[in-house]
Amino acid sequence: MAATESNMMPLGTRAPDFELPDTVTGTTKTLQELKGEKGTVILFMCNHCPYVLHVKGQLISIAEQYAQQGISTIAISANDIINYPQDAPDKMQAMMREWGNPFAAYLYDESQSVAKAYQAACTPDIYVFDAALSCVYRGRLDGSTPKNDVPPTGSDLRTALDNLLAGKSIDPRQIPSIGCNIKWKD
């Protein structure tokens, strides 16, 4: 489990467009179709990452809670499935059934071009975009990791989403996410 930090896309960056297969529905989805009315969370994750599994409850809770307030959460996996078959689309679909399908979609980025466009580096890697798809937050869910005794609360992401919904500024001093590195193809 190699700990990798996010690259911290510059605030104000427009969300790169994408068109990717949704492993839950079997259909192709675009950012324009999936974005939220008031904001969008883009979450790079994968099935087997202990950092993702450690915060599973918070990821589900936040996605469900904020969907009711106009925030869409889109999960994307870009891992190399040749070397990491547990992250294959059929396994992604099964995981979402187990989790109760909390996200607007769980997309598979086979070419890894979307992950590269977002400068994603780890799982989970979290980005928040406002209604105009401008980056207002990128960083960690909270201070919890599988290796410390801090319970997952989602506090950093929740604060950013609450401020976005309230029309308040979001503190630009944001802490990178940390997790397993994205499994890039050779």
Image (tube, helix red, strand yellow):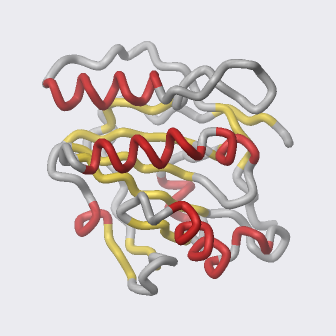
Tell me the residue at 81%/27% (across/down): 147
From the top left corner, tell me how far across and down residue 13 is, in percent. 33, 39
Tell me the residue at 73%/50% (across/down): 49
Q: Is residue 45 left or right of residue 80?
A: left
Tell me the residue at 69%/63% (across/down): 79
Determine which quarter of the picture holds residue 178.
top right
Q: Is residue 45 left or right of residue 37?
A: right
From the top left corner, tell me how far across and down residue 82 is, in percent. 81, 76
* Position of 82 relative to 179 (above/below): below
Considering depth in this image, is 127 or 48 the residue closer to the camera?
48
From the top left corner, tell me how far across and down residue 132 is, in percent. 17, 45
The quarter of the rendered structure image containing the N terminus is top right
Considering depth in this image, is 29 or 94 the residue closer to the camera?
94
* Position of 141 relative to 21 (above/below): above
Tell me the residue at 47%/77% (across/down): 24
Q: Is residue 102 left or right of residue 139?
A: left
From the top left corner, tell me how far across and down residue 84 is, in percent. 81, 68
Q: How many marks?
A: 0
The quarter of the rendered structure image containing the C terminus is bottom right
* Position of 91 relative to 142 (above/below): below
